Image (tube, rainbow, N blue to C red):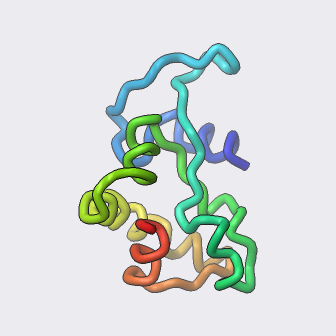
Amino acid sequence: VVEQVLKADMWQCEIGAAHKTFVARKNDQPYLEGHHLIPLSKQDQFDKSLDVYANIIGLCPNCHRQLHFGKQSEIRTMLKPIYNSRAERLANSGINISKDEFLTLAAG
């Protein structure tokens, strides 16, 4: 699923398409990492699987680390536009979640 996400996003970081990274030897594409927006550790709060295309984004390593270890206020700022672009896709996957709930869960 992660590879599908990365291909669909044309191997660009979803936080910032201009973010540069190195070329991966595995596929000769910019290196990106898959990230579950709503962590799989929160699965017990949902009836539908969180391990779905709509809940995975491709990120440059810097943005990925920031989402895991950055300041909460900055993480929430990064995630707001992601929610706006993903809310319908999440709902279509059976993950019905408000923006506030999403930001609380996704920002940890």
Q: Position of residue 61 (x, y in %)?
A: 46, 35
> Closest to the observer: 70 or 52?
70
Relative height, residue 34 to residue 104 (above, below): above
Relative height, residue 47 to residue 5 (above, below): below
Viewed as shown, does residue 77 lie left or right of 97? left
Viewed as shown, does residue 54 lie left or right of 62? right
Which residue appears at 60% of the width and 40% of the height?
6
Q: Position of residue 48 (x, y in %)?
A: 74, 79
> Closest to the observer: 35 or 3?
35
> Closest to the observer: 9 or 100?
100
Which residue appears at 68% of the width and 69% of the height?
50
Relative height, residue 21 to residue 72 (above, below): above
Q: Position of residue 29 (x, y in %)?
A: 58, 22
Which residue appears at 47% of the width and 18% of the height?
22
- Quarter of the picture containing the C terminus is bottom left
Q: Position of residue 90 (x, y in %)?
A: 58, 73
Which residue appears at 70% of the width and 63% of the height?
52
> Closest to the observer: 6 or 72?
72
Q: Quadrant of residue 8?
A: top right
Relative height, residue 51 to residue 9 (above, below): below
Q: How many marks?
A: 0
